[in-house]
Image (spheres, helix red, strand yellow):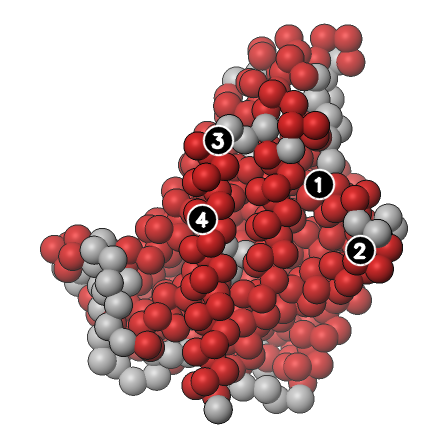
Amino acid sequence: MPEAPASDGTQWVRRQPLPWLLGPAFVAAVAYVDPGNVAANLTAGAQYGYLLVWVLVAANLMAVLVQYLSAKLGLVTGASLPELLGHRLPRRRRLAYWAQAELVAAATDLAEVLGGAIALHLLFGIPLLAGGLVIGVVSMLMLALQSRHGQRPFEFVITGLLVIITLGFVSGLFFGDVSWSGAAEGMVPRFEGAETVLLAASMLGATVMPHAIYAHSSLARDRHGSPPPRAALPRLLAATRWDVVLSLLVAGSVNIAMLLLAAGNLAGVPGTDSIEGAHAAITDALGPLVGLAFGIGLLASGLASTSVGCYAGSAIMGGLLHRQIPQVARRAITLVPALVIIAIGVEPTWALVLSQVVLSIGIPFALVPLVRLSRDRALMGRFANRAALQVTAWTVVCLIVALNVALIALTVVGGA
């Protein structure tokens, strides 16, 4: 997005067509269709049919609120969430907060690099370690594009990958069977035993992700200025609402499509609790073309999400440590733990589950400060959350935290 003239920034923003103001939320939305989501959604559909459709719908509605608050915070203050925390926390607490945020970023990177490596193995037979290296190198090139040419070209590339993800994961619906009456029944909130609670929490943990919250505040700030003219904020916030709703409508539809695909065509098929098994079952049930589309969608998911995850990690480090390193260099550093885990032969599905547990631990650390800061009138002025929005936001936080505590507890009990 070209910079607005400093003397007439408000009029410049008002003259822009709405589509030109969209983009940051589509980048953040990639986190909602990463390989962790693929595993959780396919498992839910294959094992429990349409039972947990309501979880995806509820998670997406929660995500709309959370991502809007993050973008609003970045727009109004001209600072990212990590930057705001970095200026408010004393040194020891700031370093401790940074350590948990980096752990979350590492867990995210593990899932995304591993998912991309699995896709390359499914499509071309490339070993997982070599596939992880390929994903890392390509993501470096994408981040170099953002560093050299600015955010707008990066948004176009990520949005293009989101289109490929959508086509890859939704195409199976046109070839398989779906019970729309069963899907409608799945909109009624209910569980069937502890396993469905665990799976619902995994689906939520794979949807509302800490690094997407950190990244969106930075993406909105970087796209529209630091900060934009106050008089331009109503127009930008209105555009941001459209940006968030449209992008998460796409991401939510993809997630629901995966669950419906599995519920209608993979019910009772063994091995669908892993991405490789689900791919094999999809290929057997719907044909090699659908299996190929699924593999390409998974590859695009890994590439896009790992690039966005690295962007988030850079925002976390810069905001909390007050230090910036080139994103390409950071990509090279953070790639190492994921490659080590792949190299030592950790079972891929188990590694994905572990990464989701770590993400669940990190969610409250992102959500609670976000809701508190976006209500701070000294910081946000007249754009601070009003009472009804704040009550809704805290309700969402409590629900998300409760389900993720259940995920952690059930995972520990299950592994005991």
Q: Please, what is the three-letter code of the amino acid marked with disc 2?
A: Arg
Residue 80, disc: 1
- Counting residues from the N terminus, which is met first, the one under dot 4 or under dot 1? 1
Instruction: Work out how far the residue at label 4 is from the one at label 1, CA to CA, in angstroms.
Output: 21 Å
Q: Is residue 78 above or below residue 145?
A: above
Q: Which residue is mark 2?
A: 94
Q: Please, what is the three-letter code of the amino acid marked with disc 3?
A: Ala
Quarter-of-image position of residue 76:
top right
Q: Which residue is mark 4?
A: 396
Q: Is residue 264 above or below residue 163?
A: below
Quarter-of-image position of residue 114:
bottom right
Q: Are marks 4 and 1 in contact (CB under 8 Å)?
A: no
Q: Give the mark toward the camera: 4 or 1.
A: 4
Q: Residue at x 59, y 79 (%)?
A: 128
- Left/right of residue 237 with respect to residue 73 in the rendered view: left
Q: Please, what is the three-letter code of the amino acid marked with disc 4?
A: Val
Q: Are marks 3 and 2 in contact (CB under 8 Å)?
A: no
In this orientation, which residue lies closer to the viewer: 159 or 202?
202
Considering the image in quadrants, where does the N terminus appear? Answer: top right
Q: Please, what is the three-letter code of the amino acid marked with disc 1?
A: Ser
In this orientation, which residue lies closer to the viewer: 134 or 35?
35
Judging from the image, what secondary structure is the residue with disc 3 in? helix
Q: Label 4 crowding class (10 Å Cα cut-off): few <14, some 14-19, many 20+? A: many
Q: Which residue is mark 3?
A: 387
The residue sitting at the bottom extreme is: 416
- Counting residues from the N terminus, which is met first, the one under dot 3 or under dot 1? 1
